[in-house]
Amino acid sequence: MEQKLIRPRVTINLEPYLQDFLWHEFGCSKNEEGVIITSAHDIGEMILSQVVALDRPPKLQNMENPITLLLPTLEWNHYLFRDNFICIPELRQKQVQKYIKAYYHLRIKEYFVAGYAKGYKQDVIIRSFLEHYNIKNNATSYDAVKKYDYRSRQKIIKEVNRDIQKILQI
């Protein structure tokens, strides 16, 4: 009789578009019971660094957008996970949320740089990005990606302006 491996798990609050991004980044199917985190990914390392072991069950907090994360059992943490209650406290969840959001923005920027280099229009790049990361294409997600690209391009324009002004002052 084969015994099923029970993976340690934590639940965090995460915006739906970031949940879609996380599912994609870790190559998991939404049919699974949660996102299978691996320490080989930078996001996985960050999440693992925020896990806290407690000697009693943590208080359950009210979450609007919960997502279950299945943690890897490694040589240094398997006793910790087996003998304790684990969670990611609210303050540490905010750090994880910020990190995932920053990683998401980095991916957007990479996507736009590659798309513009190929000569694609902004609309096509946005739709392609949303489809690639399986993010529901609605007005909110479309506008958020578009706004991020706009702000990024405005920063580049300001940097170019500063560089030209330095040259002209010489």
Image: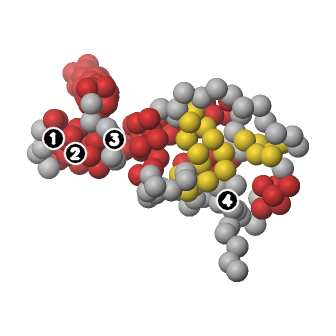
Name the residue nearer the viewer: 9 or 130: 9
Whole-Å distance between the Cαs marked 2 and 3?
10 Å
Q: Nearer the viewer, mark 4 or mark 2?
A: 4
Name the residue nearer the viewer: 40 or 34: 34
For label 2, the crowd category at 10 Å Cα-Cα, with few meaning under 14, some 14 to 19 and many 20 or more, is some
Q: Nearer the viewer, mark 4 or mark 1?
A: 4
Whole-Å distance between the Cαs marked 1 and 2?
6 Å
Query: Disc 2 or 3, which lies upstream in sequence?
Result: 2
Q: Secondary structure at mark 3?
A: loop
Question: Residue 11 is drawn in which quadrant?
Answer: top right
Q: In the image, 150: left or right of 83?
A: left
Q: Which mark is residue 98?
A: none
Q: Which residue is mark 3?
A: 135
Q: Which mark is residue 128?
A: 2
Q: In the image, 102: left or right of 126?
A: right
Name which residue type carries label 2: Ser
Q: Where is residue 22 shown, x and y percent of the image?
A: 47, 47
Q: Secondary structure at mark 2?
A: helix
Relative to 79, say whether 155 is above or below: above
Query: Disc 4 or 3, which lies upstream in sequence?
Result: 4
Q: Nearer the viewer, mark 2 or mark 3?
A: 3
Name which residue type carries label 3: Ile
Q: Secondary structure at mark 4?
A: loop
- As drawn, the residue found furthest toward the right would be 55
Q: Nearer the viewer, mark 1 or mark 3?
A: 3
Name which residue type carries label 4: Arg
Q: Where is residue 88 shown, x and y percent of the image?
A: 69, 39
Relative to 143, say whether 46 is above or below: below
